[in-house]
Image (cartoon, helix red, strand yellow):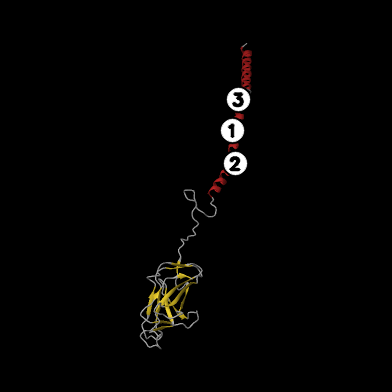
Amino acid sequence: MRTTTRPALLAVGAVATLALSLTACNDGSGTQDSAVGTSASSAAPSGATSAPASAPASAPAAGSASAPSGGRTSTSGGGSSSSGTGGGGVTAACTTKNTSVTFLQSSGHASDAQPAAATLKITNSSGAPCTIVGPTTVVADDDQGKASPVSGDNSKDGSDAVDVPAGAAVVANVLYNDVNSEGTTSARYTCPVQASHVKVALPKDAGTTVNVMKANGSPGGVFSVCGTDFKVGAFAAR
Protein backbone atom coordinates (compact mmCIF):
# COMPACT_ATOMS: atom_id res chain seq x y z
CA MET A 1 0.00 0.00 0.00
CA ARG A 2 2.74 2.49 0.85
CA THR A 3 4.56 1.80 -2.39
CA THR A 4 1.56 2.64 -4.53
CA THR A 5 0.31 5.58 -2.50
CA ARG A 6 3.55 7.67 -2.47
CA PRO A 7 3.94 7.93 -6.21
CA ALA A 8 0.36 8.96 -6.46
CA LEU A 9 0.87 11.74 -3.96
CA LEU A 10 3.92 12.96 -5.81
CA ALA A 11 2.01 13.05 -9.01
CA VAL A 12 -0.79 15.05 -7.43
CA GLY A 13 1.73 17.57 -6.01
CA ALA A 14 3.35 18.04 -9.40
CA VAL A 15 0.02 18.68 -11.02
CA ALA A 16 -0.86 21.26 -8.38
CA THR A 17 2.44 23.07 -8.84
CA LEU A 18 1.95 23.21 -12.58
CA ALA A 19 -1.53 24.60 -12.15
CA LEU A 20 -0.34 27.39 -9.90
CA SER A 21 2.35 28.33 -12.40
CA LEU A 22 -0.16 28.59 -15.19
CA THR A 23 -2.48 30.67 -13.02
CA ALA A 24 0.30 33.15 -12.25
CA CYS A 25 1.15 33.50 -15.91
CA ASN A 26 -2.41 34.18 -16.91
CA ASP A 27 -3.43 36.72 -14.17
CA GLY A 28 -2.56 39.77 -16.42
CA SER A 29 0.25 41.20 -14.33
CA GLY A 30 2.88 40.42 -16.91
CA THR A 31 0.89 42.14 -19.64
CA GLN A 32 0.36 45.22 -17.47
CA ASP A 33 4.06 45.49 -16.73
CA SER A 34 4.79 45.31 -20.43
CA ALA A 35 2.18 47.96 -21.13
CA VAL A 36 3.67 50.30 -18.55
CA GLY A 37 7.09 49.88 -20.05
CA THR A 38 5.74 50.53 -23.52
CA SER A 39 3.84 53.61 -22.32
CA ALA A 40 6.91 55.05 -20.65
CA SER A 41 9.04 54.51 -23.69
CA SER A 42 6.44 56.13 -25.96
CA ALA A 43 6.01 59.12 -23.61
CA ALA A 44 9.71 59.93 -23.60
CA PRO A 45 9.95 60.72 -27.35
CA SER A 46 6.86 62.87 -27.09
CA GLY A 47 8.51 65.07 -24.48
CA ALA A 48 11.78 65.21 -26.41
CA THR A 49 10.14 66.36 -29.62
CA SER A 50 8.16 69.14 -27.91
CA ALA A 51 11.27 71.00 -26.71
CA PRO A 52 12.78 71.64 -30.17
CA ALA A 53 9.40 72.76 -31.46
CA SER A 54 9.24 75.63 -28.97
CA ALA A 55 12.93 76.65 -29.13
CA PRO A 56 12.98 77.91 -32.75
CA ALA A 57 9.86 79.98 -32.15
CA SER A 58 11.45 81.93 -29.29
CA ALA A 59 14.90 82.43 -30.87
CA PRO A 60 13.84 84.61 -33.84
CA ALA A 61 11.70 86.77 -31.59
CA ALA A 62 14.64 87.54 -29.34
CA GLY A 63 16.87 88.22 -32.33
CA SER A 64 14.45 90.57 -34.03
CA ALA A 65 13.89 92.55 -30.86
CA SER A 66 17.59 93.18 -30.29
CA ALA A 67 18.59 93.99 -33.87
CA PRO A 68 18.73 97.83 -34.18
CA SER A 69 17.84 99.54 -37.42
CA GLY A 70 20.02 102.17 -39.06
CA GLY A 71 22.89 101.75 -36.62
CA ARG A 72 21.21 103.76 -33.86
CA THR A 73 21.79 102.91 -30.23
CA SER A 74 18.77 103.11 -27.99
CA THR A 75 19.06 104.68 -24.56
CA SER A 76 17.65 103.42 -21.30
CA GLY A 77 14.68 105.68 -21.75
CA GLY A 78 13.71 104.01 -25.00
CA GLY A 79 14.92 106.84 -27.19
CA SER A 80 17.66 106.72 -29.76
CA SER A 81 21.00 108.45 -29.81
CA SER A 82 21.63 111.48 -31.97
CA SER A 83 22.90 111.05 -35.49
CA GLY A 84 26.17 112.74 -34.61
CA THR A 85 25.98 115.36 -37.32
CA GLY A 86 27.48 117.87 -34.93
CA GLY A 87 26.94 121.44 -35.98
CA GLY A 88 26.52 124.12 -33.40
CA GLY A 89 25.90 126.83 -36.00
CA VAL A 90 29.22 128.66 -35.41
CA THR A 91 30.02 131.15 -38.22
CA ALA A 92 33.64 131.50 -39.30
CA ALA A 93 35.42 134.82 -38.93
CA CYS A 94 36.00 136.92 -42.03
CA THR A 95 39.72 137.02 -42.81
CA THR A 96 41.86 137.83 -45.81
CA LYS A 97 41.80 134.09 -46.61
CA ASN A 98 38.04 133.91 -47.21
CA THR A 99 37.41 137.46 -48.45
CA SER A 100 38.64 139.88 -51.09
CA VAL A 101 39.45 143.50 -50.20
CA THR A 102 38.94 146.57 -52.38
CA PHE A 103 39.94 150.13 -51.55
CA LEU A 104 38.54 153.02 -53.65
CA GLN A 105 39.78 156.61 -53.34
CA SER A 106 37.27 159.38 -52.76
CA SER A 107 35.35 160.70 -55.74
CA GLY A 108 35.77 164.27 -54.48
CA HIS A 109 38.08 166.35 -52.35
CA ALA A 110 37.44 167.36 -48.79
CA SER A 111 35.83 170.70 -48.04
CA ASP A 112 35.08 172.80 -45.03
CA ALA A 113 31.70 171.06 -44.82
CA GLN A 114 32.78 167.44 -45.15
CA PRO A 115 35.85 165.24 -45.44
CA ALA A 116 36.83 163.15 -48.42
CA ALA A 117 35.34 159.65 -48.31
CA ALA A 118 37.20 156.64 -49.64
CA THR A 119 35.46 153.25 -49.70
CA LEU A 120 36.65 150.03 -48.09
CA LYS A 121 34.85 147.00 -49.51
CA ILE A 122 35.00 143.46 -48.10
CA THR A 123 33.57 140.69 -50.29
CA ASN A 124 32.99 137.19 -48.94
CA SER A 125 34.68 135.00 -51.55
CA SER A 126 34.03 131.71 -49.75
CA GLY A 127 31.02 129.44 -50.01
CA ALA A 128 29.86 130.01 -46.43
CA PRO A 129 28.87 133.02 -44.29
CA CYS A 130 31.50 134.80 -42.25
CA THR A 131 31.42 137.43 -39.52
CA ILE A 132 33.45 140.56 -38.87
CA VAL A 133 33.73 141.05 -35.11
CA GLY A 134 35.99 143.78 -33.78
CA PRO A 135 37.89 146.74 -35.24
CA THR A 136 39.27 146.79 -38.77
CA THR A 137 42.49 148.73 -39.33
CA VAL A 138 43.79 150.51 -42.44
CA VAL A 139 47.42 151.66 -42.73
CA ALA A 140 48.71 153.98 -45.47
CA ASP A 141 52.41 154.40 -46.14
CA ASP A 142 53.83 157.11 -48.40
CA ASP A 143 55.14 155.64 -51.62
CA GLN A 144 58.32 157.75 -51.39
CA GLY A 145 58.83 157.12 -47.70
CA LYS A 146 58.98 160.87 -47.01
CA ALA A 147 56.34 160.77 -44.27
CA SER A 148 55.41 158.50 -41.44
CA PRO A 149 52.64 155.97 -42.05
CA VAL A 150 49.14 156.99 -41.02
CA SER A 151 46.39 154.67 -39.85
CA GLY A 152 42.78 154.53 -38.78
CA ASP A 153 40.27 151.97 -37.53
CA ASN A 154 36.60 151.64 -36.67
CA SER A 155 37.00 150.67 -33.03
CA LYS A 156 34.63 153.46 -31.95
CA ASP A 157 31.90 153.24 -34.56
CA GLY A 158 32.12 149.90 -36.30
CA SER A 159 33.35 147.09 -34.07
CA ASP A 160 29.94 145.41 -33.67
CA ALA A 161 29.52 142.00 -35.31
CA VAL A 162 28.59 142.11 -38.99
CA ASP A 163 27.51 138.94 -40.82
CA VAL A 164 28.55 138.67 -44.46
CA PRO A 165 26.68 136.00 -46.49
CA ALA A 166 28.57 133.94 -49.05
CA GLY A 167 29.20 136.05 -52.15
CA ALA A 168 27.94 139.24 -50.52
CA ALA A 169 29.87 142.41 -49.66
CA VAL A 170 29.95 145.05 -46.95
CA VAL A 171 31.43 148.54 -47.23
CA ALA A 172 32.75 151.16 -44.85
CA ASN A 173 33.53 154.81 -45.48
CA VAL A 174 37.08 155.94 -44.82
CA LEU A 175 36.92 159.64 -43.96
CA TYR A 176 40.08 161.70 -44.40
CA ASN A 177 41.44 165.13 -45.30
CA ASP A 178 43.16 165.46 -48.66
CA VAL A 179 43.53 169.25 -48.65
CA ASN A 180 46.87 170.78 -47.73
CA SER A 181 46.08 174.10 -46.12
CA GLU A 182 49.74 174.87 -45.38
CA GLY A 183 51.10 174.69 -48.89
CA THR A 184 50.79 176.87 -51.94
CA THR A 185 47.73 176.91 -54.13
CA SER A 186 49.40 174.68 -56.68
CA ALA A 187 50.21 172.17 -53.98
CA ARG A 188 46.81 172.39 -52.35
CA TYR A 189 45.99 168.75 -53.02
CA THR A 190 49.46 167.41 -52.42
CA CYS A 191 49.59 165.75 -49.03
CA PRO A 192 52.58 164.31 -47.16
CA VAL A 193 51.24 160.77 -47.57
CA GLN A 194 50.66 159.70 -51.16
CA ALA A 195 49.83 156.01 -51.03
CA SER A 196 49.11 153.88 -54.07
CA HIS A 197 48.45 150.90 -51.82
CA VAL A 198 47.14 150.37 -48.28
CA LYS A 199 47.28 147.55 -45.77
CA VAL A 200 43.91 146.34 -44.46
CA ALA A 201 43.71 144.14 -41.37
CA LEU A 202 40.40 142.58 -40.39
CA PRO A 203 39.90 141.68 -36.69
CA LYS A 204 42.37 139.05 -35.48
CA ASP A 205 43.92 138.82 -38.94
CA ALA A 206 47.44 139.52 -40.17
CA GLY A 207 46.12 141.79 -42.91
CA THR A 208 46.72 142.16 -46.62
CA THR A 209 48.08 144.89 -48.87
CA VAL A 210 45.88 146.03 -51.76
CA ASN A 211 46.25 148.63 -54.49
CA VAL A 212 44.24 151.83 -54.25
CA MET A 213 41.66 152.04 -57.02
CA LYS A 214 40.11 155.16 -58.51
CA ALA A 215 36.57 155.99 -57.45
CA ASN A 216 35.16 154.33 -60.58
CA GLY A 217 37.00 151.07 -59.84
CA SER A 218 39.79 151.45 -62.38
CA PRO A 219 43.46 151.06 -61.39
CA GLY A 220 45.79 153.94 -60.58
CA GLY A 221 44.13 155.46 -57.53
CA VAL A 222 45.99 157.39 -54.83
CA PHE A 223 45.12 157.67 -51.16
CA SER A 224 46.33 161.20 -50.39
CA VAL A 225 46.22 161.98 -46.68
CA CYS A 226 46.93 165.35 -45.12
CA GLY A 227 47.07 164.89 -41.37
CA THR A 228 48.15 162.28 -38.89
CA ASP A 229 45.19 159.95 -39.09
CA PHE A 230 41.80 159.19 -40.64
CA LYS A 231 38.56 157.50 -39.59
CA VAL A 232 37.12 154.16 -40.69
CA GLY A 233 33.35 153.91 -40.38
CA ALA A 234 31.07 150.99 -39.58
CA PHE A 235 30.45 148.28 -42.16
CA ALA A 236 27.09 148.10 -43.89
CA ALA A 237 25.66 145.74 -46.48
CA ARG A 238 25.87 146.77 -50.09
Query: What residue do we see at 59% from left, 39% from top?
Result: 50
Residue 18 x/y as whole percent: 63, 21
Query: What residue do we see at 60% from left, 25% from top?
Result: 29
Snapshot quadrant of residue 10: top right
Residue 3 against residue 94 in the figure, above or below: above
Residue with the mark numbered 2: 53
Badge nearest the viewer, 1 or 2: 2
Q: Are marks 1 and 2 in contact (CB under 8 Å)?
A: no
Residue 187 against residue 43 in the figure, above or below: below
Residue with the mark numbered 3: 29
Residue 170 x/y as whole percent: 47, 71
Residue with the mark numbered 1: 40
Amino acid carrying label 2: it is: Ala
Amino acid carrying label 1: it is: Ala
Amino acid carrying label 3: it is: Ser
Secondary structure at badge 3 equals helix
